[in-house]
Amino acid sequence: MRLVGATLYALRIPFVEAFSHSATERRWSDSVVVRVRDDAGTEGFGEGAPRPYVTGETVETMLEHLGRDLWPRVAGRDLPPAGHLAGLATFLPETYLAGALAPNAARAALELAMLDCALRRVGRPMASVLPPRRTRVTYSGVVTAGSVERAVQHARRMRAIGMRHVKVKVGFDDDVARVTAVREALGPDVTLRLDANGAWTFERAVAVLDAVAPLGIAAVEQPLPRGPVDDLARLRQATPVPVMVDESLVTEADADALIEAKAADFFNVRISKCGGLARSLAIAARGSAVGVGVQVGSQVGETAILSAAGRHLAAALPEVTFVEGSFGTLLLAEDVSVESVRFGHRGEAPLLTGPGLGIRVVEERLRRRAITVRELSTEG
């Protein structure tokens, strides 16, 4: 199987409502979809969601990196067999992007597209590469930034549909009031997590966490900015609330440093952030081996492509505590697949069993929602 062509789509799909946290506010998607084509005409789709404040990538630098550095290294070459995820991952060269921590969104998008294409060519599902360990995946709800009143409305909505796990965005002056009000609206039986997106100082983190710990907080995600892992290790000792790392966990080297410093109770593993399925599996395995819990996270505004990949990862991991994503048209004005990936009542969703990623992408929707389309060939 040789790759003979690729198309890059920089998408901008409006949100049903704005999604806000302490680092930014989003009103539309910011992701890049990669469509690859092999010499038999089979297509595969992948997606990456570049975030300047996470990996250092932007949509434009991701497009440039794919076209200039990654695609020329795989175009026209024979791919490894479809059943070997590790082989497909190592087939991608190690690349670097000036000004970025790691070009992981670009790598993830191309890896997923190649894997989807390879599996579709032989009519095999993702389960043949990532055998599932569970028959359904249960997702978390998210309470975004905003007033306490708006947070309570969101929480009541989630309770009404039976969500069992909820995360609330923090990093604001009213954090304690927000968390207290959300807990009251959800009741005692819903698992509640916090996400500061690195907005707190050490002192602020200790103060807020001490105040809300009696409410039963399962974890606090990225309480401090990405920086020395010793700061997170100190915070773990200073608060009873378990610490989850997200922006501090981008590479396998990050995982090793966090483990050595005993700086995390949970890893938030996101496919786009971590550089694809293979690297996400490796990072999750590193954590699980030493008792660090795993959350399969998502990128705000991701389409069905990344959501499908995340569901396969969540279903396949030996241990997974929380799962995020699969909002589909709950957040997007339009998704890109024939099949809906939205979670249902109680946050539950079935496995995807079709060939490849298990979804059928509608190319016309990609073109309609793209602000940039770039065609690549074996000639570059």
Image (cartoon, rainbow, N blue to C red):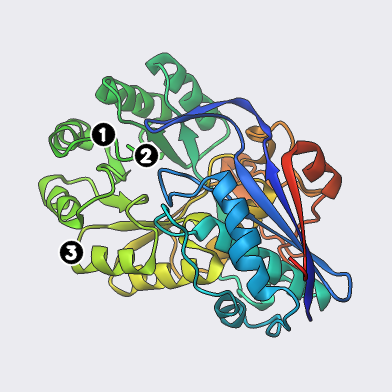
Q: In this view, does 96 lie above or below 186?
A: below
The residue furthest right is 41
Q: Name the residue under label 1.
A: 215
Q: Do the residues labelled 2 and 1 touch (CB within 8 Å)?
A: yes
Q: Is mark 2 on a helix, strand or loop?
A: strand
Q: In this view, does 194 lie above or below 354?
A: above
Q: In this view, does 346 lie to the left or right of 182?
A: right
Q: In which quarter of the image is the C terminus?
A: bottom right
**Amino acid type of the residue that numbered disc 3 sits on in the rendered structure:** Ala
Which dot, 3 or 2, sits closer to the camera?
3
Instruction: Count residues near mark 3 (Cα–Cα under 10 Å), then give few for <14, some for 14-19, many for 20+.
Output: some
What is the x, y in percent for residue 119? Answer: 75, 74
Instruction: Count residues near mark 2 (Cα–Cα under 10 Å), then give few for <14, some for 14-19, many for 20+.
Output: many
Say which label, 3 or 2, has the lower sequence index: 2
**Amino acid type of the residue that numbered disc 2 sits on in the rendered structure:** Leu
What is the x, y in percent for residue 220? Answer: 30, 43
Q: Which mark is residue 261?
A: 3
Q: Does the rendering let one see residue 111?
A: no
Say which label, 1 or 3, has the lower sequence index: 1
Q: Picture quarter containing residue 230?
A: bottom left
Q: Name the residue under label 2.
A: 192
Q: Distance between the residues labelled 1 and 3?
A: 28 Å
What is the x, y in percent for residue 31? Answer: 61, 45
Residue in the image at 24% along x and 43% along y: 224
Q: Is mark 3 on a helix, strand or loop?
A: loop
What is the x, y in percent for residue 197? Answer: 35, 39
Q: Is residue 284 left or right of residue 208?
A: right
Q: Is residue 185 above or below residue 43?
A: above
Q: Quadrant of the N terminus?
A: bottom right
